[in-house]
Structure formats: structure tokens, C-alpha cells
Image (cartoon, rainbow, N blue to C red):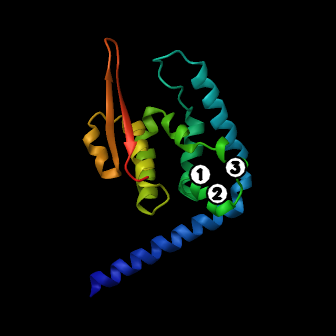
Amino acid sequence: MKKIAFVILLFVQISIGQTDKDSLLKRDFHLFKDEVIQLTETKLHQIKQQKRGEVTKRLDDDEAIKILEITKKYGYLSNYRVKSIIGEEYFIDQLNVHLLFQCFPEKYKKAAYLLLKAEYKIGNIKRCDFGYLVIDILNVKDFSVLEEYGIVVTEEIISEKSWMSRFECLDK
């Protein structure tokens, strides 16, 4: 009986926490929207400018900490979540938080992974989206791990100098 009460209490706490995050996001989104969009655009520009095979330009420490703080307070800013809570569509293509997490410095990747895992567990990140984040943040090489997130390898391309895999999400 105590276990059932504990589970119910835990579920209520998670639900209340999520409701609070959603309310905060709706209330405060205008305060950080432009900053996150500008950061995304800067990283996209830097990635387009880099040479093929070069390591993706990383966020600096302050930028990484800012994204972690925003995510911790407001939840993961996926396009579908922001659109459903805020209702604004004009900036959705400019908001790419997944890209920002791809650009995390090595020393913050574990913190990012733990935060994103918590966001996935409460439903702020779709299963395949979390799987792709796992690939990018943890530099996963054993792709069989990704099956639990609905991602399978559809093709492997091997050349003399490189190796690449293509992935597909089964949750379409």
C-alpha cells in the first residue's frame, strides 16, 4: 500500500512540475526566445563555414550553461512543445535546440545528457528525438543501443577515408 501511495505521489509531483514548466515557458518565452534563436543562427552559420570533416563548432562555456539553465527551468524547447504551449509559428524554423545540444563542449555533455534524459522521461522529448540526441551527445558507436529509442541503422556507407551510417526513426 505504501508503494502505491509513493508512486501516486511521485506521479503527482512530476505532473505538477511539468505544469509549472509549461506555465513558466508560456509566461517567460519572450525573455529568452531571441537569444536562443540568435545562438542557433550563429551555430548554423559557423557549421556551414567549416571544412568538411571538421569537428562542429562548440558552444562556449557561458552559452552551454545558459542552454542548460533554460532547459532545466522551462523544459526541453522542442518545436512541437513550444508550438503547442506558445502558439507562435513564425520562429519555429529558427529555433533548433537539438543543434545547440549537438554543439555542447565535452565537459558539459554528461550534465546535458542527464538533463535531457529527465526531460525525455517526463515526455518533453519524443522517443526518436532523444535517441538522436544520445547519438550526438554521447558519441554512441554501438547503434544497437538506439533500438530502444525507435532508431535503426538503415544504411552504412564505408569509403577509404570515412564511415557513415544513416538512421531511421520507427515512430513515424
Query: Please, what secondary structure does the residue beneath circle 3 have?
Result: helix
Judging by the rendered image, the residue that carries numbered circle 3 is: 32
Kind of residue sitting beneath label 3: Phe
Q: Residue furthest bottom?
A: 1
Please state which of residues 88 and 111 is positioned toward the viewer in this rendering.
88
**Amino acid bearing label 1:** Asn
Q: Which numbered disc, 1 or 3, marks the residue that appears first in the sequence? A: 3
Q: CA distance from mark 2 to mark 1?
A: 6 Å
Q: What residue is rendered at 59% in x and 51% in y?
A: 79
Q: Residue at x 49, y 16 (%)?
A: 52
Q: Is residue 75 above or below residue 158?
A: below
Query: Which residue is disc 1 drawn over?
Result: 79
Indicate the position of residue 23 as horizontal and vertical percent values. 64, 67
Do the CB atoms of the residues marked 2 and 1 lie less than 8 Å apart? yes
Q: Given this view, does label 1 or label 3 mark the residue nearer the observer?
A: 1
Tell me the number on the disc at residue 83.
2
Q: Are marks 1 and 3 in contact (CB under 8 Å)?
A: no
